[in-house]
Amino acid sequence: MTEIQKLKFDIKLKNHVWFWGSYFTLNFLRWGAYFNDYPYSFKSNLIEFSLHIPLVYFNLFVLVPRYVLKQKYITYTFSLIVSLFGIYLLKTALTYYIISENIWPEANREYHPFEINHIVAVCIGELYVLAMASSVYLTLTWLRERERNRSLRENQFKIKLKYLENQIQPHFFFNTLNNLYALSLESSDKVPDVIIKLSNLMEYVLYDVKGTKFVPLIKEIDYIQNYIEIEKLRFENVEVTVNLESNIEDIVVPPLIFISLVENAFKHGGVNNNNLKIKINCKVIDNKMLDFEILNNFVNSQNLNAKGGIGLVNTKKRLKLIYKNDFSLKHKTKLNYYIIRLQIPINNED
């Protein structure tokens, strides 16, 4: 894209016509009333606006892109002075031959062409119109560009968020299928139950939350509990406790935002652990923040080095995209428990 293409005639033609028509009418009525001579005001403004308009667009679409945007300010100034001198010649000639031999009737005395006061007055008048019209156009262009950039950022946000969600879902099902495969090798009679529960989970992911920015927290909890039931089929000795506050019915959350935390507790807490204990606490703090805490015991500290993975990494990225810095995700160890605590702003269904 060249520099000249950066300023485009992207405001609708009717808006240009409306602007110049309104400006012409205002000037015509103003000077007609001032001199009590509307025919003269009409002819005078007709000449002036036939010069104002070409100069404004010549400046916007030729001089500014070629010189100002390329930081050639001296060349721009020289070109503008030459343009103003050309406008002066045309205005003076048209006024002399069409309106009056007195080229500046508004003054207190008769002026002749090329007198310094007349030249300065004409140039100042042109610069005033040039500055005003250009300011309006550039302001509107800036507002349109800002809106376009905002829309572009929003689309990029949605694409990136969707990409992260699509990564999380295959990651979860990959792990679940691994679990199912392990049970099938053992010819376990638990396989049919796992398949049914996995089917319910897939239905939630593929249909219930598809294209949805927020889902009811209750549904998300149900999803987590189904996942827990699948994991209980795989682990012989596992104890899971879920504590929920009673006032979370109307709260909505991003879909699948907690599952990576739960999955992480099973994945790393269950390594070499014959008595896995997991506790999930979900509550509201000061009617502002939703607090989701998950604790799991572990056998030795070496297991903690493996914590993380694509699930938690993507969860952090999604939280950053959705809430920016208005969330908290912390982890710590206490005795033989690993604790992850997530706090996000409360969103209600309404």
Image (spheres, grey):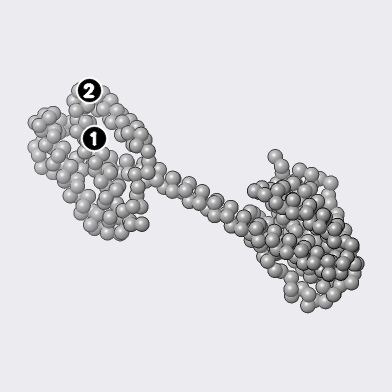
First reached walking from the N terminus: tag 1 or tag 2: 2
The residue carrying pointer 2 sits among few (fewer than 14), some (14 to 19) or many (20 or more) residues within 10 Å by Cα, namely some
- Tell which of 59 and 30 is nearer to you: 59
Q: Residue at x 26, y 27 (%)?
A: 28
Quadrant position of residue 95: top left
Quadrant of image for the N terminus: bottom left
Quadrant position of residue 293: bottom right
Q: Position of residue 268 (x, y in %)?
A: 79, 70
State the residue position of label 2.
38
Q: Residue at x 78, y 52 (%)?
A: 200
In the shown orientation, is residue 241 left or right of residue 96?
A: right
Quadrant of image for the C terminus: top right
Image height check: is 152 above or below 105?
below
Hey, what amino acid is under mark 1? Answer: Phe
Image height check: is 279 above or below 222?
below
Question: Is residue 350 among the parts visible in the rendering?
Answer: yes
Label 1 element class: helix
Q: Position of residue 291 (x, y in %)?
A: 76, 55
Question: Is residue 19 among the parts visible in the rendering?
Answer: no
State the residue position of label 1.
49
Q: Position of residue 217 (x, y in %)?
A: 76, 49
Hey, what amino acid is under mark 2? Answer: Tyr
